[in-house]
Amino acid sequence: MCQERIEKALQKTEGVCKASWDVESKMATVQYDDTRVKPDQLYAVCAGVGHDTQSIPASDDVHAALPECCQRKSKGM
């Protein structure tokens, strides 16, 4: 679910050529035209569909609407 949501959102972004999400590493690999889109815009796209990034966290409301398997894991568990 996460993989499809993240890849679809990134691939719909103008300037993105290819996007793939690795479930195990929880990292996206994105090929994009850096004259049309910047990394912070890509982070914002992921945060916009409910997933935290290294620089932009998802809003609690959007994140809460994700399926349980995609919810943040509590620290210390």
Image: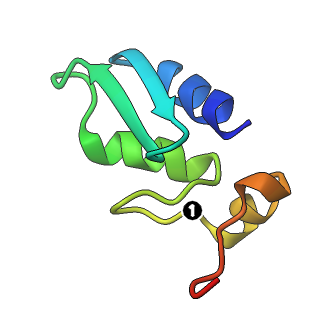
Q: Picture coordinates of residue 17 (x, y %)? A: 36, 11
Residue behind mark 1: 58
The structure residue drawn at horizontal position 39% and vertical position 14%, both measured from the top left corner, is 18
Asked whether 27 or 16 is in front, the reply is 27
Quadrant in the rendering for residue 31: top left
| Residue 59 vertical placement versus 6 (above, below) | below
Judge left or right: residue 36 versus residue 21.
left
Which residue is at the far left?
Answer: 35
Q: Is residue 13 visible?
A: no
Element marked by disc 1: loop
| Residue found farthest to the top | 17
Q: Residue at x 57, y 30 (%)?
A: 9
Q: What residue appears at the point 51 percent right and 45 percent down from the top-left corner?
A: 46
Query: How packed is label 1: few (under 14 Cα within 10 Å), some, or many (20 or more)?
Result: some
In the displayed structure image, the side of residue 23 where residue 29 appears, left or right:
left
Coloration mode = rainbow
**Residue 21 vs residue 45, the one in the foreground:** 21
State left or right for residue 32 relative to residue 12.
Answer: left
Amino acid of disc 1: Ala
